Amino acid sequence: MASTSAPRSSLSSAASRIATAASNLSSDSQTLIAEIRKSFGIIKGIAVDLEKAQRSDKVKELENTVLELLESCDDCTNLSEATKNVGNNYQPSGQPTDFVKLLEDKIATLKEESPFVPHNNPLYRQFKEAIWNVHHEGQPMPGEEQEDIVMTSTQNILLNMTCPLTGKPVIELENPIRCMDCKHIYEKDPVMHYIRTKGQALCPVAGCPKFLQEGRVICDPLLRIEIEEIRAASTSNKAVTNVEDYTEINDDID
Ligand SMILES: [Zn+2]
């Protein structure tokens, strides 16, 4: 009874406590997602070794594990997003709130918007590609011979490789952040300044129709892991390029 006449200030502080708790829960899930992402990298490495050793039965087992892992990762992402959403939209009232139902509804909506389709999942494709390349380097994967499909192949998980505002390569950004809606990546300070000074901040990547909102452009834990992977890959590419350069110089001397 007393709760119906609770002063407005205590209701709004309840709302902000709920929002904070939801945001903490949501970032816990993000930590878990980052761990899953790291495990994926380890499993992929083991699978490549097994493929080299011609243990295709074991590779197949790992492939199934990867699928399970990625689906759990997807569930976890939805849970994290739903928790944050429910927390932010909670309005205190005299009636009890059915949080379980709110969460379940939000998760169902998110699943409907982007269902888990293994063959569209960039990490699953990356796994398949890594295995394929063990014995077929340079050849298109079966069913992906057409050029346009090969173009979307996923050596790069990151959507843009330079910050559209500063032109800096993403792997060199000090504080990379990513838009949760369009997944484009920017340097933090310039993009925050951009969002604050524009009334309606259209994503600065040419042709992107999404609008940026302060709370939805964040450094998700996956971003740093993904950037680190690209950085590692580009360092090894650079090593190869340097060898080529060196050969050219030698050729000149000859
Ligand atoms: Zn964008």
Image (tube, grey):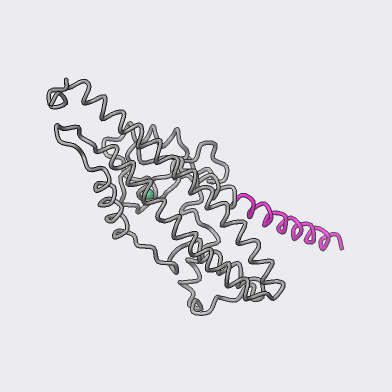
Provide residue 104's location: percent of width, then percent of height.
28, 51
In the rendered image, the quadrant that contains the N terminus is top left
Q: Residue furthest front?
A: 1
> Which SS type dominates the magenta stretch?
helix
Q: Looking at the image, which is closer to me, 48 or 105?
A: 105
> Is 189 or 60 nearer to us in this picture?
60
Q: Is residue 28 left or right of residue 104?
A: right
At which x and y percent is residue 108?
28, 56
Could you say which quadrant of the image residue 193 lies in?
Answer: top left
User: Considering depth in this image, is 124 or 58 the residue closer to the camera?
Assistant: 58
Residue 222, placed above or below residue 135:
above
Q: Position of residue 12 (x, y in %)?
A: 23, 26
Find residue 52 and report its horizontal and vertical position in percent. 70, 71
In the rendered structure, which segment of residues is drawn in magenta?
231-254
In the image, residue 157 sits, relative to residue 28, either above or below, namely below
Q: Nearer the viewer, residue 77 or 152?
A: 77
The quarter of the displayed image where residue 248 is located: bottom right
Q: Residue at x 55, y 47 (%)?
A: 225
Q: Quadrant of the C terminus?
A: bottom right
| Residue drawn at x 45%, y 57% as measured from the top left | 72
Seen in the picture, residue 230 relative to 135 is either above or below; the reply is above
Q: Residue at x 28, y 37 (%)?
A: 88
